[in-house]
Image: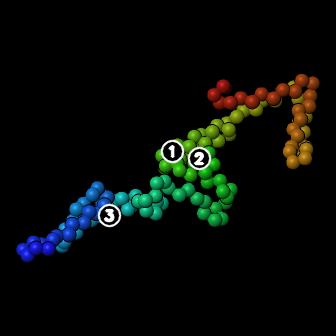
Amino acid sequence: MAIGQAIQVRANVRAEFGLTKIIQGASAIISDGDTDTVRQFIGQQSSAELHPSYHIPPAYNTLDGRQDYNGLESDDLTVRVSKLTAMMADKAQDKTITKGFTGCSIVSNTASGLNRSIAFIGPAPLLNIIMPSSA
């Protein structure tokens, strides 16, 4: 180094809003409080995570290992919530199915191995299943 020259160190810092250049004695905010709050709300551990971690807490009264049922581990929150909403709508519609029995006087429900055998007995047994969309 020649006499009369000075070297100043500059650091490039990756902040929430892009690259920030700081020099000796300067400082820069590298974390945004709002971003940290959102990250905590959705359960994201760090900004390096690409998607939320979907897991079921122990003893949660659900089927273990089914947290990705009808979804992918890499689903973002919007995709996952959309899939869950669609599944809930399907389940709600299942509860509104109307069953109409005609021509039967006896319905039997017996074990058949691991399955159940349901029989409709009568002169002309008929079971009509009516979905809300077809009613």
The residue pinned by badge 3 equals 31
Please report contact status of discs 2 and 1: CB closer than 8 Å, yes or no.
yes
Decide which of 44, 41 is in the foreground and name it: 44
Q: Position of residue 49 (x, y in %)?
A: 46, 58
Which residue is located at x 6 percent, y 74 percent?
Answer: 4
The residue pinned by badge 1 equals 79
Please tell me how crowded label 2 is: few (under 14), some (14-19), or many (20+) other residues with Cα within 10 Å.
Answer: some
Q: Give the distance between the C-alpha atoms of the residues marked 3 and 1, in whole angstroms.
A: 27 Å
> Which image quadrant: the C terminus?
top right
**Residue 89: quarter of image:** top right
Please tell me how crowded label 1 is: few (under 14), some (14-19), or many (20+) other residues with Cα within 10 Å.
Answer: few
Image: 81 above or below 61:
above
The residue pinned by badge 2 equals 71
Decide which of 89, 128 is in the foreground and name it: 89
Left or right, 77 with reference to 59: left
Which residue is located at x 87 percent, y 27 percent?
Answer: 125
Q: Secondary structure at mark 2?
A: loop
For the residue marked with disc 2, what is the amino acid? Gly
Q: Secondary structure at mark 1?
A: helix
For the residue marked with disc 1, what is the amino acid? Val
Q: Give the distance between the C-alpha atoms of the residues marked 3 and 2, in whole angstroms.
A: 32 Å
Q: Position of residue 19 (x, y in %)?
A: 27, 58
Residue lying at the far bottom of the rendered structure: 3
In primary-sequence order, the first of circles 2 and 1 is 2
Image: 100 above or below 90:
above
> Which image quadrant: the N terminus?
bottom left
Residue lying at the far front of the rendered structure: 2
Q: Secondary structure at mark 3?
A: loop
Q: Give the distance between the C-alpha atoms of the residues marked 2 and 1, in whole angstroms.
A: 9 Å
- Is residue 105 something one can see in this rendering? no
